[in-house]
Every structure is written in C-alpha cells, then in structure tokens.
Image: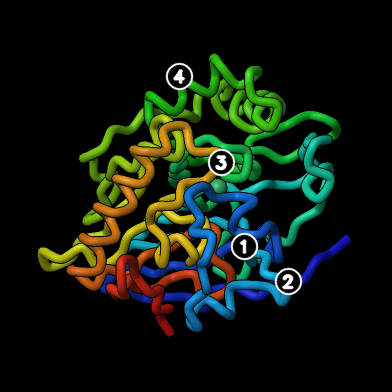
C-alpha cells in the first residue's frame, strides 16, 4: 500500500537551517478535558484556536518528525509512531501503515543519509521509526546515524517500560534494536550537536525530556519543543499538563519559562503535535499566549 502525503508544514528556512516536517498521522484526537488537567470549566476557546479544533471540539493533533538540514548535516528530530507497531490498546496505531517515509523523501532524504537522530524523549509516539519490520525482525531505520538520547530518559524507560502498558512494546521493538546495534549515544543539556544547535532541558512531561535551540548571531532563532505543548490550547492555557506528564508541576513550570523566553526572543517554535503549519511564535495574550504560525 502506498500512502500519499498528509497536510504538513511547508519547509522553513531559518538562517542557515532548513526544516522539513515528516508527518506520520494527523487528525481529531480527544477533547481538551480528556487529555489535559486544569482545563477551566468555563473555557471558551479564543477564535485563533478554531482551526486546531474539530467541529465536535476534539483537538486536531499530528504525530510527526522534523528533518533538519544544516550545512552537510542531516538530522531527524523524533521518530513518531512508526509502522507495523504492536499497540493493541491503541487500535488506530496497532499494526498501522504510514506515509512518513514519503515525507522523508519529499525532504530529499533517504534513511541512509541521516547522520543524527535526536530523540526528545522515549514515549511511543516519538520512537516508532527508529526501526522497521523486515522479514519479521525489527531493524534500525537509520544505520548510519548517531541516535542521541538523554541519560535520565534512557535509564528510566529501559528499566521501567513494563510498568506502562503503552510503552511495554515500543521500548523492545523500537529502542532496543537501535541500542543493540550500538547506535545510541547519551547527550546532555548544554551540548552542541551541530553548529549553533544546542540541547536544552525540558524535563517534566517525561523524566528526561530534552529539546533543541538553534542560535545564530547571538539570538535563539528556532526551538524544537518536543512535547512542551501537545496542542495550541496549551499556549492559551499554559497551566494545563497532560494526564501523561511524569511531573505535572515541572511540566507547567518548564512550559511557562520557555514560552516567556521564546515570546520575548520571537523564536520560531517547532511543535511535534501541532497539525499543519506547526511552526510559529508565541505572542502574549491575557494570562497565556496566542500561537501565530509562520508562513
Ligand atoms: Zn508526544
């Protein structure tokens, strides 16, 4: 089965950095109150949120990766849900097919050309394309890439995944084969993984979540936010963590701090789970922010 491209972010050029989106899936998911805590009872969605909500109020979300081209470097940020995964508790993901590789091709990239895979965290919807099923075996998708992950994240999930039903198959099927092939390397906040591209600590949503900031001319021009926000609703309501946050208070604090920093610096934020034009700026609005997508 060949799947065509889904609606996706148009490629962005920010200084010397080119960014492409690889969409794995996208569509209506859940009501804000079904994914988030602290949702105000009287919340009326601001008008700018309308394109991100289905007619029945469900949040439209994407599951995707970003491909970064910087000089000769080709970096994949996160690996979405993947293909053929064993997720019986999630019928929409269980053994599904995906057009992710078609999007990688639209970025002009083959898996062999990827030199770095940066994993913001190890949740199942960020590790799927680490491997592909070949003759019944899970094999690494990116055999020539360093796979960068935080120590806290790697240690937590590789020892505790069986306590979490939604992680019990993704770690053995997606992460372990890359680790067994010697492809995993630990990276720490503050490290530069390429010229101008620095690792930042975003812990809260998951124990050791990290992101990337791209600095040129002394300014942070772009940020790869991982799951700092799952939906633009969390710009309007930064006080709302998800039901899946490992440390909800830290998740809120990290989100507020980064939104303030990026609003002040006019940083373009790349958001894994925002649909369509998922890159944009935070602009202060009331107690929260408005998301203003980049063209
Ligand atoms: Zn996620």
Comparing marks 2 and 4, which lies closer to the viewer? Answer: 2
Q: Earlier in the sequence, mark 2 or mark 1?
A: 2
SS under mark 2: loop
Q: Is residue 32 above or below residue 158?
A: below
SS under mark 1: strand
> Which residue is rendered at x = 39% and y = 52% of the image?
239
Q: Which mark is residue 155?
A: 4
Label 3, label 2: how far apart the Cα atoms are: 21 Å
> Which residue is rendered at x = 83% and y = 35% of the image?
88
Callout 4: 10 Å neighbours few (<14), some, many (20+)?
A: few
Tag 2 residue? 56
Tag 1 residue? 61
Q: Is there any visible trace of residue 31 in the rendered image?
A: yes
Label 2, label 1: how far apart the Cα atoms are: 14 Å
Comparing marks 4 and 3, which lies closer to the viewer? Answer: 3
> Which residue is rendered at x = 72% and y = 77% of the image?
55
Label 4, label 3: how far apart the Cα atoms are: 22 Å
Q: Quadrant of residue 188?
A: top left
Comparing marks 2 and 1, which lies closer to the viewer? Answer: 2
């Amino acid at each position: 089965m060949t799947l065509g491209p889904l609606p996706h972010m148009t490629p962005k050029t920010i200084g010397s950095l080119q960014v492409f989106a690889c969409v794995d899936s996208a569509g209506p998911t859940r009501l804000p109150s079904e994914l988030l805590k602290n949702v105000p009872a009287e919340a009326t969605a601001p008008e700018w949120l309308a394109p991100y909500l289905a007619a029945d109020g469900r949040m439209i979300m994407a599951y995707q990766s970003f491909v970064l081209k910087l000089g000769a470097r080709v970096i994949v940020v996160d690996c979405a849900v993947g293909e053929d995964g064993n997720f019986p508790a999630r019928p929409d993901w269980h053994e599904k097919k995906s057009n992710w590789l078609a999007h990688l091709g639209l970025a002009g990239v083959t898996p062999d050309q990827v030199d770095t895979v940066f994993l913001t965290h190890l949740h199942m919807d960020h590790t799927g394309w680490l491997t592909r099923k070949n003759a019944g075996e899970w094999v690494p998708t990116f055999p020539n890439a360093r796979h960068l992950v935080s120590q806290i994240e790697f240690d937590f999930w590789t020892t505790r995944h069986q306590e979490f039903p939604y992680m019990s198959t993704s770690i053995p099927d997606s992460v372990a084969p890359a680790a067994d092939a010697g492809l995993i390397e630990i990276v720490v906040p503050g490290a530069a993984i390429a010229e101008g591209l620095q690792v930042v600590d975003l812990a809260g949503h998951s124990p050791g979540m990290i992101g990337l900031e791209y600095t040129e001319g002394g300014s942070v021009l772009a940020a790869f936010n991982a799951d700092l926000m799952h939906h633009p609703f969390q710009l309007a309501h930064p006080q709302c963590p998800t039901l899946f946050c490992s440390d909800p208070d830290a998740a809120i604090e990290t989100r507020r701090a980064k939104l303030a920093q990026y609003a002040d610096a006019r940083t373009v934020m790349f958001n894994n789970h925002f649909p369509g034009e998922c890159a944009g700026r935070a602009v202060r609005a009331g107690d929260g922010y408005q998301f203003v997508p980049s063209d």
